Image (cartoon, rainbow, N blue to C red):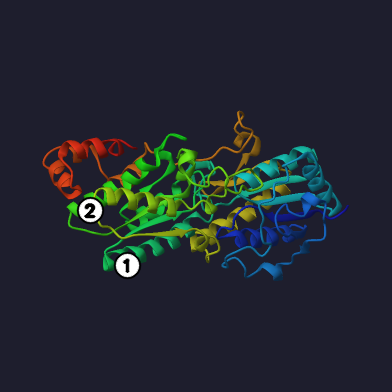
Amino acid sequence: MNQQTLGILVGGGPAPGINGVIASATIEAINEGFRVVGIYDGYQWLAQADTSHVVVLSIEDVSRIHWTGGSILRTSRTNPAQDDRSLANSVKALRALGITHLLCIGGDDTTFGAAKIAELAGGAVHVATVPKTIDNDLPLPDNMPTFGFETARAVGANIVESLMEDARTTTRWYLVVSMGRKSGALALGICKAAGATLAIIPEEFPAGGLALDELADILIGAMIKRRAMDHDHGVAVIAEGVAERLDPAQLAGLEGAARDAYGHVRLSEVALGDVLKSTVSRRLAELRLKVTVVTKDIGYELRCAKPLPFDVEYTRTLGYGAVRYLRDGGSGAMVALRGGKVAPVTLRDMLDPATGRVNVRLVDTKTESYEVGRKYMIRLDPIDFEQPRLSRLATVAGLSSADFIDRFSRVAAVR
């Protein structure tokens, strides 16, 4: 009987804990009699039917990588399902490499590609995925976080805490744009953990229904409210996905921005922070309010950070569970945990029947988890438009009470 071979690849952006999955999956597979092949650069070379970018892994190779950041197999955003040829090439390359089982470490796009490979392979290659993304936007059982999220939030919170002290020391406002293409979980989590002044996430707004001036006035309203409390500084954390809720015509460069292999706008190339700073500064000048505004993007600093013990332990269990699932004949599922036990989630069940894409988990703004974060933020609320608060805020803004209501009441209703 020919020896079974496990292939391991990583797709999408980096996340702390990738090497923990690679290590535990490799060790468990070898202990179960598998040969293990690491595939470099995600689906990139497979999609070209190129079988030369691989490495045979041993226990010695991976025994001490679980506490390191990055990916020893690197990663890419190549979409193997972008066309029939790429998908056929991927399956052909896997067969040529003798891979009988494939473990794909990635987020929604990597999972989508894995589902298509499993479908075309027709059982010849058993495929499983492990959920990875700092965005925390995959629909896992029991609302478990995706691995890498906890480390990214911790590192992001440390950065924001430092900015908060800098803001206090220099009496300025920081507009921090955080990664999070669809979900605002990371921005909200960083804000809550650090105790930042406020967070703004895409789930608060309807798609395409957010005006740039309205977004700016949410920030300016917070600045006015802070000044009314005798504080001339603050830090706002804005999820990059807010850009997709804006009217595209109002966001310079969005329609012409570069897109990745899955068709997503590269939000990191949309200067959301600069656009916001310009708009906020212009509208502050109209009110004759002097505020120093500084922008800061955070995201790349988080993705290859040394994983927290939570993510080290989590990923070792996921890698082990994925191999056991594949060894027992499983295929076509994402391996997650439920109550500490391995809980495969069928890839087919994760797809939205209307779009054919993997469902995205968004922040539920009706939960106490969101509510407590919102309650502790400094943002304009309906009560701020009642006396005596109204007069105090209007005076700080240099407006009459009626003009303050006319200008800012719409942003107090956003939730």
Q: Residue furthest top?
A: 354
**Badge 1 amino acid:** Asp
Question: In terms of sequence position, does the residue under pointer 1 or pointer 2 come before the other?
Answer: 1
- Residue at (65, 35) in percent of width and height: 348
**Badge 2 amino acid:** Arg
Q: Is residue 384 left or right of residue 139?
A: left
- Residue at (82, 46) in percent of width and height: 89
- Residue at (64, 60) in percent of width and height: 24
Q: Residue 45's spot in the image, x, y percent?
A: 77, 55
Q: Can see residue 108?
A: yes
Q: On the image, numbered disc 1 is attached to which residue?
A: 166
> Given contact means CB atoms under 8 Å apart, are the residues at marks 1 and 2 in contact?
no
Question: Of 145 and 396, which appears nearest the observer?
Answer: 396
Q: Is residue 79 left or right of residue 403?
A: right
Q: Is residue 342 above or below residue 166?
A: above
Q: Residue 392's spot in the image, x, y percent?
A: 14, 46
Q: Is residue 275 left or right of residue 63?
A: left
Question: Of 320 and 386, which appears nearest the observer?
Answer: 386
Q: Quadrant of residue 230?
A: bottom left
Q: Residue 55's spot in the image, x, y percent?
A: 77, 64
**Distance between the Cα atoms at labels 1 and 2?**
16 Å
The quarter of the picture where the C terminus appears is: top left
Dot 1: element? helix
Q: Residue 313's spot in the image, x, y percent?
A: 54, 60
